[in-house]
Image (cartoon, rainbow, N blue to C red):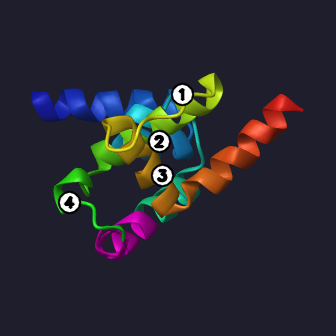
Amino acid sequence: MKKVFNTKLKRELKKVYSKNELLLLRKYPYLVVNNPSYEILNRAYKRYIKNIDDYVLLNGYPSHWFSKSRRTFCNAVKTYIEAKKAGYTYDNGTNGYIWIEIVKVSGFNKYLDEIFDCFTE
């Protein structure tokens, strides 16, 4: 019975959401509201996974500060967006500062900055 329900749910979701939104919903569920491009977001996450070990070694941060989970990456992107909207800066060593650094390591901040520049003009 559960399998039948899941297939019906998937069919209904395909009617409501676009392909980009369905991929976001599956892999990055916390960012569906912001609706970034899935291809760019996924590329940024892979770049973050590739670069984080070198970044931790170069800057001397503890490695447990930087999780490699998708949920942490989603929280980092949400925090970056909200901090950018409010013009807020975080103190060194806080969770907010670490999440901002995660977005900067991934390079996704350049894409987000371009988006915010379009909104402010």
Contact, CB < 8 Å: mark 3 with mark 2? yes
- Which x, y percent locates residue 64? 17, 55
User: Which circle, 3 or 4, is nearer the viewer?
Assistant: 4
C-alpha span from label 3 to label 4: 17 Å
Within-10-Å neighbours for mark 4: few <14, some 14–19, many 20+: few
Magenta span: 46-58
- Which x, y percent locates residue 103? 48, 52
| Residue kind at label 3, given as amino acid type | Val
Q: Number of labelled discs?
A: 4
| Residue kind at label 1, given as amino acid type | Glu
Q: Which residue is mark 4?
A: 62
Residue 115 falls in which quadrant of the image? top right
Identify the mark nearer the N-term, 1 or 4.
4
Tag 3 secondary structure: helix
Identify the mark nearer the N-term, 3 or 2.
2
C-alpha span from label 1 to label 3: 13 Å
Within-10-Å neighbours for mark 3: few <14, some 14–19, many 20+: many
C-alpha span from label 4 to label 2: 21 Å
Q: Residue, x 9% and y 27% (percent of image)?
A: 1
Q: Which residue is mark 2?
A: 77
Is residue 106 visible in the rendered structure shown here? Answer: yes
C-alpha span from label 3 to label 2: 6 Å
User: Which circle, 1 or 4, is nearer the viewer?
Assistant: 4
Contact, CB < 8 Å: mark 1 with mark 3? no
Tag 4 secondary structure: loop
- Which x, y percent locates residue 42? 46, 59
